[in-house]
Image (cartoon, rainbow, N blue to C red):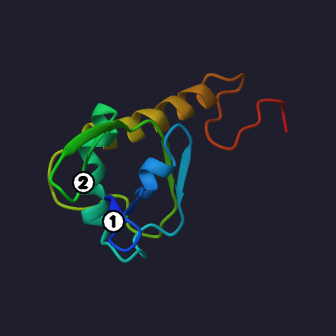
């Protein structure tokens, strides 16, 4: 699912979902209910999310890079404080937190500064 899949009968590769979503938006609905564990997904995407490139390998062993330029949107009922192992915050996690901070800061800077849910028009 996260790496190239080779069909020996047709001799054709199927691109992983992150490659199919390149330069677009990848929506993962109900993150954590896939066949792969959330820890495996995060560990597989941690370098591509932070560096903007992904490494793929052909069946003959040739390794190559592709751009990893997508917006990742995930919905989940998992505890956000327990996405995987207890390692320090990754650059990707810091990016998500920074985006959340910027959104809250923009809301707080509106007239009235009410934060989340405030429309800024007095309603």
Residue placed under numbered mark 2 in the picture: 58
From where the camera sits, is residue 119 visible? yes
98 w.r.t. 45: above or below: above
Name the residue nearer the viewer: 96 or 11: 11
Q: Considering only order in the chain, which callout, 2 or 1, is on the residue closer to the N terminus?
A: 1
Q: Residues within 10 Å of mark 2 (few under 14, many from 20)?
A: few
Q: Quadrant of residue 67?
A: top left
Mark 1 crowdedness (10 Å alpha carbons): few <14, some 14-19, many ≥20: some
Q: Position of residue 18 (x, y in %)?
A: 43, 51
Q: Position of residue 66 (x, y in %)?
A: 34, 38
Query: Could you tell me if the residues under marks 1 and 2 are in contact, i.e. CB atoms within 8 Å?
Result: yes
- Residue assigned mark 1: 6
In the rendered view, does 17 fall on the left or right side of 107? Answer: left
Let me know if residue 89 appears in the view.
Answer: no
Quadrant location, the C terminus:
top right
Residue 21, label in figure: none
Q: Is residue 53 above or below residue 87?
A: above
Determine which quarter of the picture holds residue 29.
bottom right
Q: Secondary structure at mark 2?
A: loop
- Indicate the position of residue 73 as horizontal and vertical percent values: 52, 51
């Amino acid at each position: 699912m996260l790496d190239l899949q080779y069909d020996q009968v047709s001799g054709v590769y199927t691109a992983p979902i992150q490659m199919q979503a390149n330069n677009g938006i990848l929506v993962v609905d109900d993150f954590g209910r896939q066949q792969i564990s959330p820890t495996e997904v995060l560990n597989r995407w941690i370098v591509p999310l932070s560096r903007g490139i992904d490494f793929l390998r052909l069946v003959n062993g040739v390794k190559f890079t592709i751009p990893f330029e997508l917006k990742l949107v995930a919905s989940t009922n998992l505890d956000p404080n327990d996405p995987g192992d207890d390692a320090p915050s990754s650059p990707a996690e810091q990016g998500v937190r920074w985006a959340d901070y910027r959104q809250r800061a923009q809301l707080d800077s509106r007239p009235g500064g009410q934060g989340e849910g405030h429309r800024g028009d007095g309603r």
